[in-house]
Image (cartoon, rainbow, N blue to C red):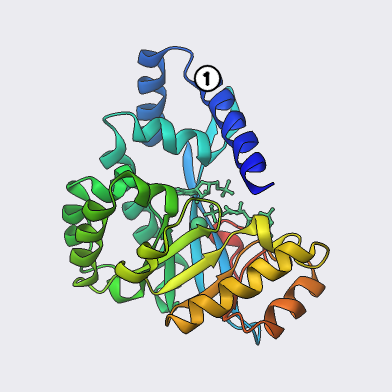
Amino acid sequence: MITVSYRIDYMKLIHSIKEVSVDQNDLATQLSDALKNNQMYLVYQPIFDCSEFIVGYEVLMRWTHPEKGEISPYQFIMAFDDSELISKLTEWFFDRLVSEMKQVGLLKVKKIFINLSFRQLEDPSLQTIIDNHQDSIDFNKVVFEITEKTLMNDISGAMKIMEDLTTKGISFALDDFGTGFTSMQYLKVLPLSYIKVDKGFVGEIDINHSDMTLVKASIEMSKAMGFSVIAEGVENKSQFVLLKSMGVDYVQGYLFDRPTMKDELS
Ligand code: G
Ligand code: G
Ligand code: MN
């Protein structure tokens, strides 16, 4: 059942990418315009502990295309990944994050969760970008979220980079846990601090017994291995109650807050 829904998602993805990449040259121009012309922006979604105190924010990119409107990050991150512009995107992201964090006092926040694609992680300029921002961001607060699919590209390469970044204070979360093809080996060898249980499982824990069992087992296993567990996509109270009873550490989802722009942050 899980495999089927993953395939459908994948097909949707391919379809939507085709829609954007009508013409490769045109696409490159559009991506570069997006960065130059202020078409991209950041939104923030809080992550709470079980007493509903904010422990951090996940930062998410958005792109409003002048003609096509909102383009999903699933689409544009993959387009950037395939282009030469990926380091420009990472650079833009950190510059923008620093300027917004200063404006809204986000610097006081305990943790900042940042999604990184495989291309962003393996790009050598990531190190330079981080070094250039050492004075403006406390990297002990930074958690990079990477997915199982990211890791599958090159597990030993990714591990080496992750270990290097750990020496700069950065920690790691395994995002979308349960949707990829995680080998238990990953959990044993990678320098991970957090496991984010995918919203696909969390979304039905209150109505689907299998999902409930899988989430419960994931939480128990992750905690036994010393990771903190974040449940994403919590949309109603009964899911939250169940997750708390299962011993989850942190929660995130529409029940608490949607991703919002910096000006709307409380
Ligand atoms: O925010 P939304 O649900 O539309 O995000 C869709 C996907 O895009 C998610 O998997 C999310 O992790 C990814 N995404 C959102 N913002 C970023 C970003 O800044 N960098 C990377 N690499 N992925 C992002
Ligand atoms: O793949 P990743 O976990 O990074 O995706 C994060 C995205 O999930 C956010 O950008 C946001 O758009 C979406 N999201 C956050 N909370 C919820 C929720 O409660 N329900 C659903 N369906 N999506 C959510
Ligand atoms: Mn994420």
Side of 203 where 42 appears, left or right: left
Q: Quadrant of the C terminus?
A: bottom right
Q: Residue at x 47, y 36 (%)?
A: 39
User: Which amino acid, by three-letter code, is at mark 1?
Assistant: Lys
Front-most of residues 202 and 66? 202
> Can residue 193 be seen from the camera position used here?
yes
* Farthest bottom residue in view: 51
Q: Residue at x 47, y 34 (%)?
A: 76
Up-down: is 85 above or below 261? above
On the image, the x and y values in percent for residue 138 come to 29, 73
Up-down: is 44 above or below 138? above
Q: Residue at x 71, y 85 (%)?
A: 245
> Can residue 38 be seen from the camera position used here?
no
On the image, the x and y values in percent for residue 119 come to 30, 42
Residue at image mark 1: 18
On the image, the x and y values in percent for residue 184 come to 42, 64
Q: Quadrant of residue 34?
A: top left
Side of 257 where 23 appears, left or right: left
